Amino acid sequence: MKKIRVKLSSNPYNIYIKPNLLKSLPSIIKKYDLGNFGIVITSKSVGRLYRKKMAKIFPKNKYLIITVADGEKAKSKTWLFKVIDKVVKADTLSRQLFLICFGGGVVGDLGGFIAAIYKRGIPYIQIPTTLLSQIDSSIGGKTAIDLPIAKNILGAFYQPKAVCIDPLVLKTLPAKEFKQGLAEAIKYSLIKDKTFFAFLKKNHALITKQDSKTITQLISTCVRIKAQIVEADEKETKGLRTILNFGHTLAHALESSSKYRSVPHGYAVSIGMLYAARLSQYLKKSRSSDVSEVEKILKLYSLPTKFLANPLKLYQSLVYDKKFIRGKIRMVLLKNIGKVSVVEGIRPETIKLTLERFGTK
Ligand SMILES: NC(=O)c1ccc[n+]([C@@H]2O[C@H](COP(=O)([O-])OP(=O)(O)OC[C@H]3O[C@@H](n4cnc5c(N)ncnc54)[C@H](O)[C@@H]3O)[C@@H](O)[C@H]2O)c1
Ligand SMILES: [Zn+2]
């Protein structure tokens, strides 16, 4: 079993990664001694697919399983209070509650937020079941729900006691969800790790068929990178987490111009990364050979590299994005494969021009 330590000064924790880890879950959870009654939060699809396994891992006398809707709509006020009402009912005098998030990023964000606010904080464990949640959202303690006005606007930094990753659960994940996670894996390679980029290029066949050893290595590498960035800037106060936003500026504009629905996040990130690389080349910060490497790897994984949106509308959406207030445009740009830099003061005209060019390519 791989064990990666997230070395935070006040809340350090371990991330365990192993194919078939679900089997060892009862002993891992027991070791942590977090309380005498567990609330398991899961989503509809995961609850259905893993019903038998969950019944074994989480026996009825010690756990209550709460199932929320699939997808982003569970990160809402309605679902937050539906779950909290059930938690309150389960919280009898003799019980010390702890929480388990068993699902994708949505379940992790919602469950983590409940753990953060219920009685000013109860312990929780993340058991992420999508590639995105295994390599990204379950690490770093960011928890949140959405309000109609904006995504992730109601949230807290609240670290889990442990993260348990079983790469085999990805076998049941829809192919599209898996591919979205791969876009984030490519992001890690571009921002931090040239060797990992070479690994992704070389192992395309094994990765797409989810060879267990290769996927475990992929997940561990991403987890290590994310953990290092989080360790350096736990609460996002030093600006060091900013590089994680590589590709995400245009991605958010693409998503918001489609009301978060029609463009899946990972696909938007794929397009956003290529745009950031092209913009970087335009500003003479990266070489054309590196930009074509970016394009090649995205195409290798059948990720989109073009957008179907009006460049002008996208530009307006970018300019109104909170990152661009007071006319200052700040973006994470590619320097070379494995290295990015945060560039400030990009002129709005440059964004407009490069978007127009990108849109027609
Ligand atoms: N907290 C953070 O740092 C952070 C970082 C990135 C993203 N996020 C958040 O993560 C969320 C997206 O997470 P996601 O991409 O994991 O999507 P998700 O949680 O919506 O899961 C996608 C779908 O797959 C299903 N599913 C999950 N695991 C499965 C499995 N093993 N087999 C079959 N079906 C499965 C879910 O029920 C859901 O329908 C967004 O809300 C985003 O804001 C948070
Ligand atoms: Zn992302």
Image: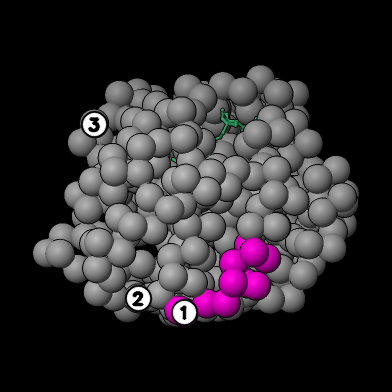
Q: What residue is pinned by disc 1?
A: 285
Which stretch did the figure color magenta? Answer: 284-294
Q: What residue is pinned by disc 2?
A: 343
Q: Find residue 314 and report its horizontal and vertical position in percent.
A: 32, 44
Answer whether residue 42 is magenta in the image.
Answer: no
Residue found 47% across the figure and 45% down from its top: 360
Q: What residue is pinned by disc 3?
A: 148
Q: Dominant secondary structure of the magenta stretch?
A: helix
User: What amino acid is at disc 2?
Assistant: Val
Instruction: Of the two numbered discs 2 and 1 on the same chain, state the one appearing first in sequence.
Output: 1
- Which quarter shows the N terminus? bottom right
Residue found 81% across the figure and 45% down from its top: 208
Mark 3 or mark 1, whichever is nearer to me? 1
- Observer-nearest residue: 169 or 333? 333
Q: Find residue 294 and report its horizontal and vertical position in percent.
A: 63, 62
Q: Is residue 318 above or below residue 257?
A: below
Question: How would you rate the neighbour count of disc 1 (Cα within 10 Å): few for under 14, some for 14-19, many for 20 or more?
Answer: some
Q: Are marks 2 and 1 in contact (CB under 8 Å)?
A: yes
Residue found 58% across the figure and 54% down from its top: 184
Q: CA distance from mark 2 to mark 1?
A: 10 Å
